Image: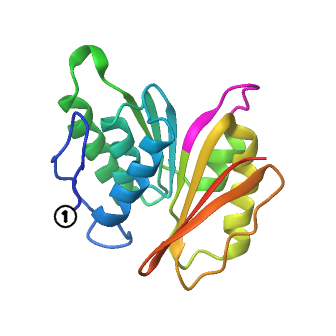
């Protein structure tokens, strides 16, 4: 069972769907958030968690100081669990410092296509953790739709199987670095 690693909700256990999701391991989440802390942390940032599953990545960001988090998950049972996890995490925050956490029950592409573009603003951190079997063209389409929704200094993190190829980066996104953790590989990107 995954748990929140650090922040105001540290050590809280998160529920996970019985099937259909692949939670990011504690080891990989710790590496992700250590790297984000090294880049300046999450205080006051806007976070988007695509293919959210139980919401573990986005909710870890909320616990560590993100001001707002959107969890996008099309699987209704998984989204219901993400909503329950969000309530558990936000209740752990001080009343005057609760992050805003929204759960959007829809597929990633329709969500991204309908999201408003705000010039000079946007999402500061985006987690893209699709099912490993997601076709590469669909991932590329999602990354293309995401690019205009990013803040100028945004960080985009794509998590995939080490057996999948590097994502095809669309115009608007540039690869910063890659790191493998056993079966999992992380690609870090930023706006071009």
Q: Residue at x 39, y 50 (%)?
A: 34
Which region shows up in magenta? Answer: 116-125
State the residue lying farthest toward the bottom: 163
- The answer to which image quadrant residue 16 occupies is bottom left
The image shows residue 48 at horizontal and vertical percentages of: 52, 43
State the residue lying farthest toward the right: 171
Decide if residue 138 is in sight here: yes
Location of residue 158 with respect to 34 vertically, above or below: below
State the residue lying farthest toward the front: 38
- The answer to which image quadrant residue 174 occupies is bottom right
Location of residue 69 with respect to 158 vertically, above or below: above
State the residue lying farthest toward the top: 96
SS for callout 1 = loop
Q: Residue at x 66, y 50 (%)?
A: 110
- The answer to which image quadrant residue 155 occupies is top right
The image shows residue 53 at horizontal and vertical percentages of: 39, 59
The image shows residue 94 at horizontal and vertical percentages of: 21, 20
Quadrant of image for the N terminus: bottom left
Circle 1 is placed at which residue position?
1
Dominant SS in magenta: loop
Residue 83 relative to residue 178: left or right: left
Location of residue 138 with respect to 125 vertically, above or below: below
Q: How many neighbours does mark 1 have within 10 angstroms: few (below 14), some (14-19), or many (20 or more)?
A: few
Q: Residue at x 60, y 36 (%)?
A: 123
The image shows residue 184 at horizontal and vertical percentages of: 46, 75
In magenta stretch: residue 120: yes
Residue 71 relative to residue 139: left or right: left
Count every numbered label the image shows and give the total.
1
């Amino acid at each position: 069972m995954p748990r929140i690693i650090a922040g105001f909700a540290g050590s809280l256990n998160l529920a996970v769907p019985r099937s259909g999701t692949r939670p990011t391991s504690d080891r990989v989440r710790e590496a992700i958030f250590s790297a984000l802390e090294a880049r300046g942390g999450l205080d006051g940032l806007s976070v988007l968690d695509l293919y959210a599953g139980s919401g573990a990545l986005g909710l870890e960001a909320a616990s560590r100081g993100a001001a707002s988090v959107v969890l996008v998950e099309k699987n209704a049972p998984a989204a219901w669990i993400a909503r329950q996890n969000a309530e558990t995490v936000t209740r752990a925050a001080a009343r005057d410092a609760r992050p805003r956490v929204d759960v959007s029950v829809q597929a990633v592409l329709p969500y991204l296509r309908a999201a408003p573009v705000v010039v000079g603003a946007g999402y500061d951190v985006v987690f893209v953790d699709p099912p490993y079997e997601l076709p590469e063209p669909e991932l590329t389409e999602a990354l293309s739709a995401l690019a205009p929704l990013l803040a100028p200094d945004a960080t985009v993190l794509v998590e995939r199987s080490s057996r999948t190829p590097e994502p095809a980066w669309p115009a608007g996104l540039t690869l910063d670095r890659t790191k493998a953790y056993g079966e999992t590989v992380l690609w870090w990107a930023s706006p071009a």
